[in-house]
Amino acid sequence: MKITEKMLSIPPYISTTWDNIASIHMDGDHLIISMNDNKTITITDLSVEVVEKIFECHEAFLEERQPHQKQPKVTSSQEKISNQEMLMGFPFRVGIGGSIPEGLGQTLQHNPAYADLPLLPPEVAQKISLLGKVVSPEDLQAMPPAEPNCNCIYCQIIRIMHKTQNPNDVETHEIEPIEDVSDEDLRFEQWEVHPINDKMYCVVNKLDQNEHYNVYIADKVGCTCGKDHCEHIVAVLRS
């Protein structure tokens, strides 16, 4: 048995390089390996240590394959963090004295690749609205404005916060009005997301359980389908 960042060899089941493997995931105590030629290999009786080693090496292979992405610079105001967490479950915290939200500077940026995302759920929009009340108008004005006709996460957040501070302002570039959506409309999602670890997710097609991909979310983002900004990455981000 040989498991490295370049190859996977588990006699007598498989011996190949990672670039020949489309994805891996667990089904109970079975390791399922999906090949690029649509063949599937099932391996049983692997120890927990071996399974963890396999996923670590596959994750390292995916990370190495992704293009390097620059990280945004952290400003001094973003380094000041309040002792009290605001909006539990939301991906940023409020700085001391209502300064710029830390996460907006570090993890959220305008991204035209996700311009067609659906509107944020009402409960999330409500949390952002609360945040808009504690951020100073000066700090909010200093942040890049929402881009017209863009529904990426950043632009939605900035748009909601501006509307909270200026309720009488009329938006010039509204993406779409908030409509009443039935529970039935919200219930179906084609892709089912299963976390493998804190950086890796298995995305399975609910209509075809044999179609699944691994998505890596961290400093670099990628999917084993090989496409940039694919719907599998969007499904993980929305989850």
Image: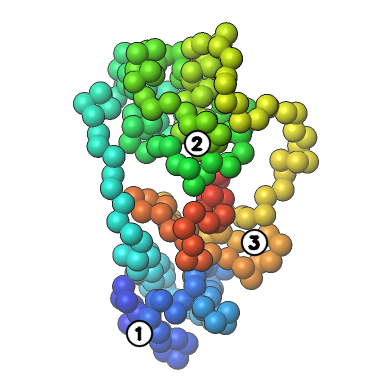
Give the position of the N terminus as an image quadrant. bottom left
Q: Position of residue 107 (x, y in %)?
A: 37, 38
Q: How is the image coloured?
A: rainbow
Q: At numbered mark 1, what does the secondary structure look like: helix, strand or loop?
A: loop
Which residue appears at 43% of the width and 58% of the height?
Answer: 222
Residue position marked by numbered label 2 in the rendering = 153
Residue position marked by numbered label 1 in the rendering = 1
Please report whichever mark, 2 or 3, sits nearer to the chain's N-terminal start: 2
Mark number displayed over residue 205? 3
Q: Position of residue 221 (x, y in %)?
A: 41, 54
Which residue appears at 68% of the width and 26% of the height?
Answer: 177
Q: Position of residue 200 (x, y in %)?
A: 44, 57
Tell which residue pokes out farthest to the bottom in this image.
12
Mark 2 and mark 3: Cα distance apart in space: 24 Å
Q: At numbered mark 2, what does the secondary structure look like: helix, strand or loop?
A: helix
Please report whichever mark, 3 or 1, sits nearer to the chain's N-terminal start: 1
Q: At numbered mark 3, what does the secondary structure look like: helix, strand or loop?
A: strand
Between disc 2 and disc 3, the foreground one is 2
* Mark 1 surroundings: few (<14), some (14-19) or many (≥20) residues within 10 A: few
Q: Of the residues shown, which amino acid type is indicated by label 1?
A: Met
Which residue appears at 47% of the width and 66% of the height?
Answer: 226
Q: Of the residues shown, which amino acid type is indicated by label 2?
A: Ile
* Mark 3 surroundings: few (<14), some (14-19) or many (≥20) residues within 10 A: some
Q: Position of residue 46 (x, y in %)?
A: 45, 76
